[in-house]
Image (spheres, helix red, strand yellow):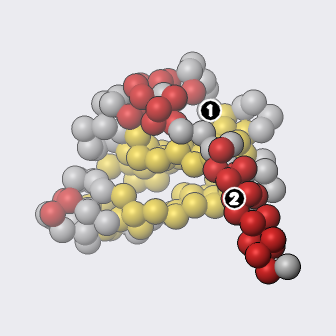
Amino acid sequence: MKKSMLSLVAVAAMAVSLNATDYRADKPDAWTAKTVPTSIKALYGEVTPAEGDITLKAPKVASNGGAIPVSVKTTIPAKSIAVFQDVNPESAVAVFAVPEGAKAAFSMKIKMKKSGTITAIVEGKDGKFYSTKLSLEVALGGCEG
């Protein structure tokens, strides 16, 4: 009984991983784009995001630009959430596919070499796009901390 239950869990985990989107492979230009608008266009095409219920959090002043804690969440039924920044050579930071039935809430640590703006884009299941921005200061030292 225990062995068959573990097999069932393994099969379920494989099914979830097989349905995951590999944004780096599918949209490689988004990861080499030098500006946020260019990266968004490479990832999603020509979109005009509206304001929506998105919470983007980071410290107002990051003492270590090499490890800035950032979280993003939304109540919008989301297909994906993407995070961008406007100071490093490449703008795209991360794209998260939101599994069916999961909460759209993610946390990460990002690098920023100097003060700038973080942008979050939510791709809604309704086919619309939503965004929010957050400015933050990086203390002297940037990514070197």
Residue nearer the viewer, 73 or 136? 73
**Mark 2, residue position:** 13
Is residue 77 shown above or below 145?
Answer: above
Residue occupying the point 41% across, 40% down: 92
In the rendered structure, the answer to whether residue 93 lies left or right of residue 50 reads left
The one nearer the camera, 97 or 56, is 97
- Tell me if 135 is positioned left or right of 75 in this view: left
Q: Amino acid at mark 1?
A: Pro
At a point 72% along the width and 46% down the height, the residue shown is: 78
The tag on residue 143 is none
The residue type indicated by label 2 comes to Ala
Q: Is residue 116 above or below residue 70?
A: above
Task: Indicate whether 3 appears above or below 143.
Answer: below
- The percent coordinates of residue 47 (x first, y second) are 60, 24
**What residue is at 68 percent from the left and 53 percent from the top?**
14
Write down the residue under mark 1.
Answer: 49
Task: Indicate the secondary structure of the residue bearing disc 1.
Answer: loop
